[in-house]
Amino acid sequence: MTVSTQPFFTTEQVAHRMKELCLEGNFLQAQKELYADDARSVEPGNVVVEGLEKIHEKGGHFAENFDVHGVEVSDPMISGKFFAMKIIVDVTHKPSGQRFPMDEIAVYEVENGKVIMEQFFFPGEPG
């Protein structure tokens, strides 16, 4: 009997599911469903979070500080085990009441059917 070495999900399948969940604003579900337990998250300034639990904590901090009004997501661009999407999240910063679009490029690396790395690129603080 031959065991398949193909991942359960291809990079393309992960990318399209990620887009679907992001458009719904369901970022936590995307992490639970698509991320490896030892995934890494990299923000500008080389701020690195290691492990799915810490990534969930980072998401919780975001949810505590921002109200999300809407999400736009580009079609994913896929190259081998990587994909990238432009994501614009219309948010209000809860402490200040300031509403603005968070405009970023997200790059993901997929291995064995799971996201093992996410990295975000954006211009910095609004205004």
Image (tube, rainbow, N blue to C red):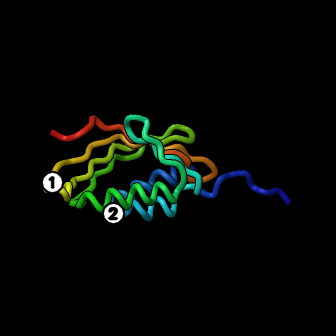
Q: Amino acid at mark 2?
A: Glu
Q: Which residue is mark 2?
A: 24
- Which one is in front, 6 or 69? 69
Q: Quadrant of residue 44?
A: top left
Give the vertical position of 115 relative to 77 (above or below).
below
Q: Quadrant of residue 9?
A: bottom right
Left or right: 86 as drawn, with respect to 102: right
Q: Quadrant of the C terminus?
A: top left
The image position of residue 103, as x and y in percent, is 27, 43
Q: Residues within 10 Å of mark 1 (few under 14, many from 20)?
A: few
Q: Quadrant of residue 61?
A: bottom left
Tag 1, which secondary structure? loop
Nearer the observer: mark 1 or 2; the answer is 1
The image position of residue 107, as x and y in percent, is 44, 41
Q: Which residue is mark 1?
A: 96
Tag 2, which secondary structure? loop
The residue depicted at 52 percent of the width and 54 percent of the height is: 13
Q: Is residue 84 visible?
A: no
Left or right: 1 as drawn, with respect to 68: right
